[in-house]
Structure formats: structure tokens, C-alpha cells
Amino acid sequence: MRSKLIAVAIAASLGVTSFTVAAAPAKQKQKTTTTTQATSNAEIELLKAQLAALQAKVDSLEQRTDAQSDINVSTGQAVETVQKAQAVSDTKVSSIDKLVSNTKVSGTMFFDMTDVSHKEQTGTGSSVKKDGHGSVNGVGYDVKRFYLSVDHKFNDIWSANLTTDFNYVSADSETQLFVKKAYLQGKFDDLFAVRFGAADMPWIPYVEKWYGYRFLENTITDRSIDGGRGTVGAAPTGIGSFGNSSDWGVHAMGATTGDNAINYQVSLVNGGGYKNPTRSNGMDVEARIGYQPIQEMVIALGGYDGKRAKDVQNGQPTRDATRGDALIAFRNDSFGFGGEYFTAHNWDDVLKYQGAVPAPTAIKDKADGYSVFGDWTFMPQWGLFARYDSVNYKYSGVNGVYKQLKDTYYNAGVSYDVLKNLRLALAWKYDKLEGPVGSPFTYKTNEIGFWGILSY
């Protein structure tokens, strides 16, 4: 546009000049025809030269303008590209930040360094120090449990958890790794949440929280009693624990807080525990309900019914294994004490005997037991604790006569909180298993040393 205006101005100048020349008096033209014509021609040529120079400058200006326009366009495109890249980068950073903010990694380790003394007596014989029935004499360091957990929150309702379970026990020189928990949770209300997958069962983990010293010993329903039962012609084997701490299935739960609070959990599970996600013809159910008249106290009842993953296609006929539970406990910043009771039927004898020879040592069983525990934080970081368990276990063969095993267990010690998340305990543990009348035996185990828990 600017170049066109310049051209019009130049043309107008030339036109005015020509008009002025044409309008001069004819007489003067005649006298100075030769001189004027020469001068006019020279002026015209000069104007043409100036016009050409101006046109060249105009062309150069247009080229510069076009080049600048290209630069401006290129710069704008580059800025737009950078802005888009920045937006993508911001989105990625936001996604990473959201992932990190909504994901929590934690761990818990149970460890010990102790000295074990295990003695066995059969009949009227003497007590002999020997390895067996879950005990190995001597000093050793163990990592009984190492839980590594990853929790991720998708939104206000949905979340997920993965917890691995690692242990190393010097007695068997084996390192094992399991998936303890792996579930998707939907929390729709404080009184209703549901977990799909391997998750905490209603009873054992609940009691552990009130007991407070799980790193030292399992609770009574989770503690295996090794020895006492067996098959014909074989040495006595363990009667095992009376529950699972985690299992695969669907778990519904809810709780209120404060005084006069309630909590519950119902789990429909495979029945084989988290180490054995076996399918069977049905699923087992475990449930718990708890009431807290005050925040520091709980009264809870629970139960279990099912086939323990033994009701399989083309397998032996089965019966239900059942267990009933009760807990009363109190815990505040200084004191903790409580008692747990359980009763179980056919926990180890779900499979029915069908007359095969030789007959098994046991075809049905029943058990009951109780545990009392207490601890006192007598000064900051220092505490005293003790526990006593008693379990009566009866089993019968094809003759219908019950034989009885009696297990007595206790521990006591002092704990010290090295850090907020590191506790050590110097303790003594004692366990005695007495065999049935007619074939008596006694197994005694003393263990003394340090136990610890580290969490982060």
C-alpha cells in the first residue's frame, strides 16, 4: 500500500512538470526552443532516474517487509510450538505429581536374634535336648516378616493395595516371598467399603491391633502348635493355627469413630489362605462385629464357617470347619490389656473318613483356648509386657475316643522405642505341649533374646 502511494506521488509530480512546460508562452518557446527542449529532456531523464531509484528502494522495502512478515510468522509458529510443548510437559508433570501424591509406599519388618532351647520327652523317658517340631536349638537371626506395601488412591472412592510378604527363618534356611494382599477397594461410606482380592480377614488382624505385640508373637488363633498329631506309623506333626490373616475373596466392612462406635467386617473367601488361592465347590465366610463403648475399649465377636478349600471336584466328602471368637480389650497411651477366646470344630478334619485302611489317627477334632495379655508404658519409650495362652485340643480316631493335647504358652519382657518407628524388645518365651494319656509326651521350648519391629 505504501509503495503504491509513492508511485502515485511521483507520477503526479511528472504530470505537473509536463503541464508547466506545456503552458509556457509560445513566443518564449519559439525563442528558446532548442535550449528549453534540451533542459526539459535533461529534467525528464533526471526525474526518471529518481523514479527508478525510488522504485528500487520501494522494491527493497517490500522485500524487507515480506522477510519480516516471514520472520514474524515463523516466530509465531515457534512460539505456538513451544506453548504446545509446554502444555504437554505441564500435563505430564501434573500426571506424575498426581501419581506420586496419590501413591504411598510403606514397609514393616519383624526381626529377632534369639537363643532357642528345645527339649522332648516321650513316655517315662528323660527329657532330651533335640531339634524338632518347629524348633531348632541354638542362636540365630531371623526376619520373620517383611511386608512391602504400595497403596494408590484413584479418587475419593476407589483405591488399590499390593502387599508382599517376605520371610527368612534360619531354622529352615529358606527365603520365601508371597503376595499377602492385593485388592481393589471401593469406599462408598464410612459404614460401607468393599475389597476385591486378597485382603485382611475380619478377626486376626483386628486382634493384632489391640494386642500391640504381633512382632513378638502371633495371636492365639494364628499361632501354630507344632507336634501332637500325625498319621499311623509317622511322628506327630503340627496341629497348625486356627485361622488365616488374609485370604482371597470379597470383603465388606465399615466403622464409626469415637465413643459408642461400631465396626464390622464380612468376608466371602476361598478358604485356603493368601498362600493358596485354590478353587473349590463353595466359598467360606468369616465375620466380625465390634462395639466400643468408649474409644479406648472394644468388645468384639466373630466366627468362621466353611470347607477351607478342601471341597474339590471328585474329592472326598467334607464337613464344615467352624470357629467362634470373642475379644475384650482396652488400650490408651499408658496401658493395654485384654483377653481373647476361641472355640473350633473339625478345623483339621474337614475331609470325612470313608473307611480306607490304614485308618488315620484322627477323623475329627475340636479345640478351645484363651489368651490374656497386658502392657504398661511406665516411662517415655519404655514398656513392660506379658501374655499367657492356654489351648486344649482334642481329636478322635475311628473308635470315637478323644485324645487330648494341652498347650501352654507365655512371654514377658521389656520394650524400648528407639525411634518412633523402631521398637526393640528383650523377652523370654516359653511353650509346653503335653501329649495324650496312653501315649504321653512333653515338648518344651525356651527362647530368649531380642525381637524388633521397623516400620516406615
Image: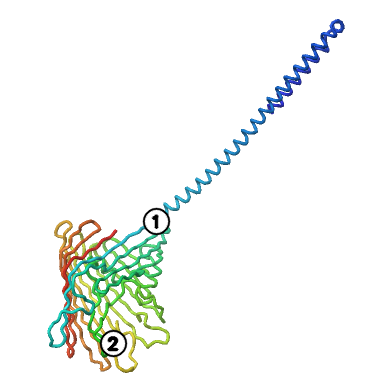
Q: Which residue is mark 2?
A: 364
Identify the element where label 1 is drawn: loop
Position of residue 60 measured from the top left corner of the image (x, y, whole percent): 67, 28
Disc number placed over residue 102 in the picture, else none: 1
Q: Amino acid at mark 2?
A: Lys
Of 394 and 412, nearer the camera is: 412
Q: Is residue 108 left or right of residue 63?
A: left
Q: How is the image coloured?
A: rainbow
- Helix, strand or loop at disc 2? strand
Q: Residues within 10 Å of mark 1 (few under 14, many from 20)?
A: some
Q: Quadrant of residue 357?
A: bottom left
Q: Is residue 247 visible?
A: yes
Indicate left or right for 22 with 67 as reference.
Answer: right
Residue for point 13% across, 86% down? 125
**Residue 352 in picture, x, y percent from top left:** 33, 88
Q: Quadrant of the C terminus?
A: bottom left
Decide which of 247, 117 is in the foreground and name it. Answer: 117
Identify the image quadrant of residue 260. Answer: bottom left
Type of amino acid at the residue the image marks with label 1 = Asn
**Residue at figure coordinates x 42%, y 51% from the top left:** 97
Q: How many marks?
A: 2
Image quadrant where one finds the N terminus: top right
- Work out how far the residue at label 2 is from the one at label 1, CA to CA, in angstroms: 50 Å
Q: Relative to residue 312, is residue 205 depicted above or below?
A: above
In the picture shown, does residue 339 fall above or below 422? below
